[in-house]
Image (cartoon, rainbow, N blue to C red):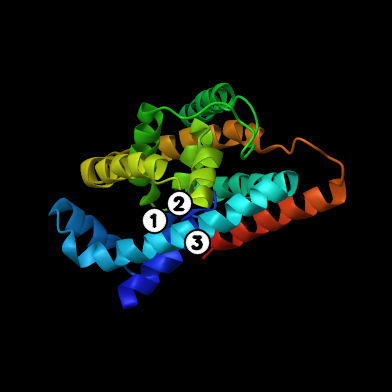
Amino acid sequence: MDMVVKGLITGCIIVLPGMSGGTMLLLLGLYERLMQDLARLRVLPWIPFVLGAGAGIVLSGKVFAWLLAAYSSIVSAFLLGCILASVKAVLGEHYKPTFRRAAALLIGLAVGLILSDGQLDLGHSDVTPTIATLLIGGILSSATMILPGVTGSSVLIIMGIYDDLLKALGDLDWITLGIFLVGAAIGIFGLANALDNIYSRYRATISWLFSGLILGAGRMLIPASFANPVLLVTAAIAGFALVWWWGSR
């Protein structure tokens, strides 16, 4: 039951951009154990955790899908605050700029701006993610999700499918979710350890690159309407403060 509850908490948290699953695992005392078990492909002890996480993701995802559909601009502003504040956690102790880090930031920023074509818009898009996009999204978001400070949701925003997956959670579209989960399983069992090793060796440069991607992709979270600027600024500050506090834990 303890692992189910920990999974439930983690699942609810990781739906929000800026909330790192890896950081949550560290706080729960599960990170090292997970990496060791992944290296040995020990899956059974983690089934209760996965079930809890799945329930948390569905629950949190359905709530955010409804909120995004009903209050699109406000939720977009809140998520923009979340994702901007997440840069602090991504950079961590590697916040001092160097030429290489600045170059990585600019490259990430350019790629993020190119990829972030359009705005977060639940239920009003005629474009359906392809199977390949969902698989790649699952692979990359799950593999990066378990790295402390890095967020899987931010990867989905960079790829432009965060709102599509929120809609799938809200509608319980099991086909879309199933394809994504196949990719997630591949990412966790096939790439997580390798990515963790690479991240450990080149953490500073990768952190600045990923920060650039986040800042560039944040463009798609700029609210489409500024009819109530005070409320939008308040929502953005609330999201920023939440993730800033979370990253300081």
Q: To which quarter of the image does residue 53 belong? A: bottom left
Q: Residues within 10 Å of mark 2 (few under 14, many from 20)?
A: many
Q: Earlier in the sequence, mark 2 or mark 1?
A: 1
Q: Helix or strand or loop: what does disc 1 sit on?
A: helix
- Which three-letter amino acid code belongs to the residue tagged 3? Leu
SS state under label 2: loop
Q: Are marks 2 and 1 in contact (CB under 8 Å)?
A: yes
Who is closer to the viewer here, 224 or 108?
A: 224
Identity of the residue drawn at 48% across and 28% down: 104
x, y (%) of residue 146? 36, 52
Q: Quadrant of the N terminus?
A: bottom left
Q: Position of residue 4 (x, y in %)?
A: 34, 71
- Residue 97 can be seen in this image: no
Q: Which mark is residue 59?
A: 3
Q: Give amino acid for label 2.
A: Gly
Q: Is residue 215 left or right of residue 35?
A: right
Hey, what amino acid is under mark 1?
Gly
Q: Is residue 43 left or right of residue 10?
A: left
Seen from the viewer's position, the closer of residues 245 and 4 is 4
The residue that mark 2 highlights is 149
Dot 1 corresponds to which residue?
22
Of labels 3 and 1, the one closer to you: 3
Pointer 1 local density, CA inside 10 Å: few below 14, some 14–19, many at least 20: many
Distance from Cα at disc 2 to Cα at disc 3 = 23 Å
Could you tell which of marks 3 and 1 lies nearer the N-terminus?
Answer: 1
Quick one: 223 or 26, which is closer to the camera?
Answer: 223
Residue shown at 58% from the left, 33% from the top: 217
